[in-house]
Image (tube, helix red, strand yellow):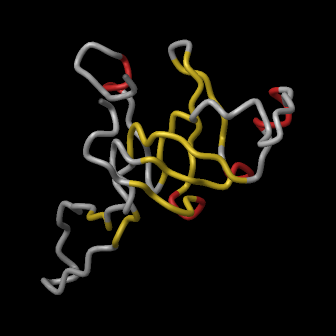
Amino acid sequence: MYEVTADNRLRRLIIVGDRVLIKPKSPTDRTNSGLYLPPTVTEKEQVQSGYVIKVGPGYPIPSASEDEPWKETEEKLKYMPLQAKEGDIAIYLQRNAIDLEYDGEKYVIVPQGSILMLDRSEDLFE
């Protein structure tokens, strides 16, 4: 349902650095007591949740080459991977999220530091 497949455009997206692409869950429009809330109230809540769609490569790590510092070498960039994985449910801070619309769907891009908790289930998309 929300996964990256060969026939959709999400496969072509490249997420940069320590950022995570999240498909927000549709918020509940009713309180526990049964009152209906307008969409503007539920969209601006401080903490939101959603499905992790794509993950950036992580934090870049500088390479420490001990081999002849004057010699020019092709620099291979290494990354420290992120904790978030595709398919997780992420609970994140809305104030650090960047809202965007891609291919008619609403997504948010969130830095790894704004993710408070991850729920990793094997049968998430079933």
**The C terminus - image quarter:** top left
For the view shown, which residue lies furthest in the left direction?
A: 67
Q: In the image, what residue occupies the spot 59% across and 25% down?
A: 106
- Percent position (x, y) of residue 100? 63, 29
- Percent position (x, y) of residue 109? 56, 42
Q: In the image, what residue occupies the spot 76% across and 36% down?
A: 43
Q: Quadrant of residue 35?
A: top right
Residue 9 or 49: which is nearer the viewer? 49
Q: In the image, what residue occupies the spot 55% across and 19% down?
A: 105
- How many discs appear? 0
- Percent position (x, y) of residue 94? 70, 49
- Percent position (x, y) of residue 44? 80, 41
For the view shown, which residue lies furthest in the bottom direction?
A: 66
**The N terminus - image quarter:** top left
For the view shown, which residue lies furthest in the front direction?
A: 33
Residue 58 or 33: which is nearer the viewer? 33
Q: In the image, what residue occupies the spot 39% across and 48% down?
A: 88
Q: Is residue 30 above or below residue 72?
A: above
